[in-house]
Amino acid sequence: MSGPGTMNGPRATGAPLVEFDDLKLEIETFDGTLRVLDGVTFSLGARETLGIVGETGCGKSVTARSLLRLLPMPPARFAGGAIRFEGEDLTKVRERRLRRIRGQRIALIPQDPMTYLNPVLSVGRQLTDVVAARQKARPPGQRLGRAGRRRRAAELLAQVQLPHPERQLEAYPHELSGGMRQRVLIAMALAGEPALLVADEPTTALDVTIQGQVLRLIHELVERLGLAVLLISHDLGVVAKVCRRIVVMYAGTIVEDAPTAALLARPLHPYTQGLLKAIPKLHGDSGRLPGIPGAIPNLLDPPSGCRFRPRCPLATEICAREKPPVVEAEPGHRVACHRYPGPPVEADFEVPR
Amino acid sequence: MARFVGRRLVFLVAMLLGLLLLTFAISHVAPGDPASLAAGPDATPEMVEQIRQEYGLDRPLPVQLGRYLLGILQGDLGRSVRTNHDVLADLADFFPATFELVTVSILIAVLLGIPLGVLSALGRNGWFDQLARVVSVSGVAIPMFWLGLMLQLLVALDLGWLPLGGRLGLMSTPPEPITHLYLLDSLLQGQWQVFGDAAAHLLLPALALCFPALASIIRVNRAEMIEALGQDYIVTARAHGLGGFRTVCLYALKNAMLPTLAMIGLRFGWMLGGTVLVESVFDWPGIGLYATQSAIAQDFQPIMGVTLLIGISFMLANLLVDLAYVWLDPRTREPA
Ligand SMILES: Nc1ncnc2c1ncn2[C@@H]1O[C@H](COP(=O)(O)OP(=O)(O)O)[C@@H](O)[C@H]1O
Ligand SMILES: [Mg+2]
């Protein structure tokens, strides 16, 4: 594979399409309140490709789902901040309005193609239903009829390079392989002609050989259709292949936000540095990082100040006291660490054998 | 599909043979001597012996079994000692009433139980759910015959809203038999008054009979709907803007229906058994009442006939459930 970011053509990055602004989200559980997102801030322009990486459990899926407001609320609730999308605050819009946004402005490609397709409905049925939902947004004269919707569904399957699209419409999910199911889910995401594609670990559940194919497909589609993408993965390698810019998450906070090339060449945050050191070992599916000793903190009672502090070899007394502010250490390269602004630091992790 | 049905049919025939053996065995281990009973209290031993020979009760068991099976193949279910009618003819007379009662009961249970289950799953722990829970707990706890008696006392005797029992009032004449189902026949012939009367007579026994089934259908459907609504494919549907009613009804219910169907099949069997009680309470002239009266008279051939008929109905109903299962769940179909 070529170097980071080189697969991207020239892209327009005007006013942000999505803006997470200090988003806080809590989930009420039996044991107490989980402070799952604690001030998530980043933005994504139209036609931009942005990746979110971080260990399993750091809040990536919750971030993706809060964008479509798919979390069960309660027990989840927004505890502050905003998600601005095309001029609306998605934390506040009504459910009816959301239905016009879901799938049609923002579409989701979920993680596990096994469970995200309805086992008792045919692929064609599930796909044409999404196509039909899209028709409501059109002026009455331009809506597709029954046959038209079916033709469109077959087109979509062809677009995700599924062989014999007409025949696949009759198939049921259990008759398809994992890779084929994921292609169907990608087709469903495209059905609403969205502006933003949110892909939450789209390849994690797939065989390694299929992973590359699906990733390439997503990349091609995004380029061809001019979509913005939010690609989520615990695997920095996956994200770096597709995205121009990467956001690193840790325990519900954004620790670093930089262009892919800069992040890979000069990671500033100690956590990102540890993440990069772990890359060769990262191709497993566990999502754990052998490069950084310790584990993600308990979100019921997160550490004071910087949430990475207990695992950070460079932690000082201020890290326990104050939450680090986000600073722009270099143009376009933001980091949330008390060591900045200042010269780049290098964290030395003791990697247990 | 064809292979599936074929397999079920083979299985059905095997079950049927088992059932025949069972009914035959029961009639021969049960206490009491049908021959002396049929002959009456004043009969001489010679007369009893004559009846015994006439009905073949003096032959060795295997011979009796062989004759029994052979007879059934020819549609001969024996003769009732009590009514002196051919059992098959009796069953043909009484079965339509039972069929009508059970069909209406299962329809009430399904058509009411599924929406109630869905609604209580949607408004989980709300007032509606609590109300539905009362229904489903009492349905499991209250014995069918007791419920029948209470309905009879309250609605028929005290309030006088509905008739006490029977299939039709004295003022109505049964409609020309086409299907032998009064509701259907009176409808087909446009006899509204008869239809109303038949429906009024049917309502209480049908309610008593359907209540336990209704209760468990609500319970199972509610639980399965809650389960289905929490599945990832519902997230997918919602993520693509498929809203409210459609998502819920189609995407979740089609999944939730699978276990519900199994419960419906099971409950149908219980219902067939329950007719014996309910028909006795409401004096409903079906095979249940026929069985009760025959049992009191120790008249075995009708009991064997009724058992066989109930068994066959149960098996056919379950075949229908299996077919519905295949229709609903593509995973049970063989790959093309
Ligand atoms: N529905 C939920 N109920 C309780 N806790 C949840 C729920 N969804 C997510 N969480 C918690 O939120 C945190 C972040 O989860 P998630 O966003 O799924 O992580 P990941 O980065 O692996 O996608 C985890 O600690 C998880 O346990
Ligand atoms: Mg996740």
Image: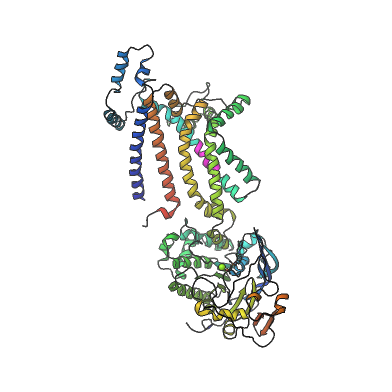
B284 to A54, vertically: above or below: above
**Nearer to the camera, B65 or B238:** B65
What residue do we see at 27% from left, 26% from top? B60
Q: Residue furthest front?
A: A353
**Nearer to the camera, B95 or A296:** A296
Ligand 2 falls in quadrant: bottom right
Give the quadrant of residue B148: top right
Q: Is residue B107 magenta?
A: yes
The x, y position of residue B132, in whole percent, is: 60, 43
Q: How many marks?
A: 0
Render colour scheme: rainbow
What residue do we see at 46% from left, 67% from top? A157
**Nearer to the camera, B21 or B261:** B21
Q: Is residue B106 left or right of residue A337?
A: left
Give the quadrant of residue B23: top left
Kindly tell me whether residue A285 is visible in this rendering.
Answer: yes
Q: Is residue B326 magenta?
A: no
The x, y position of residue A310, in whole percent, is: 65, 75
Overall secondary structure of the magenta section: helix
Kindly tell me whether residue B88 is visible in this rendering.
Answer: no
The x, y position of residue B171, in whole percent, is: 53, 21
Magenta-colored span: B105-114
The x, y position of residue A32, in whole percent, is: 67, 60
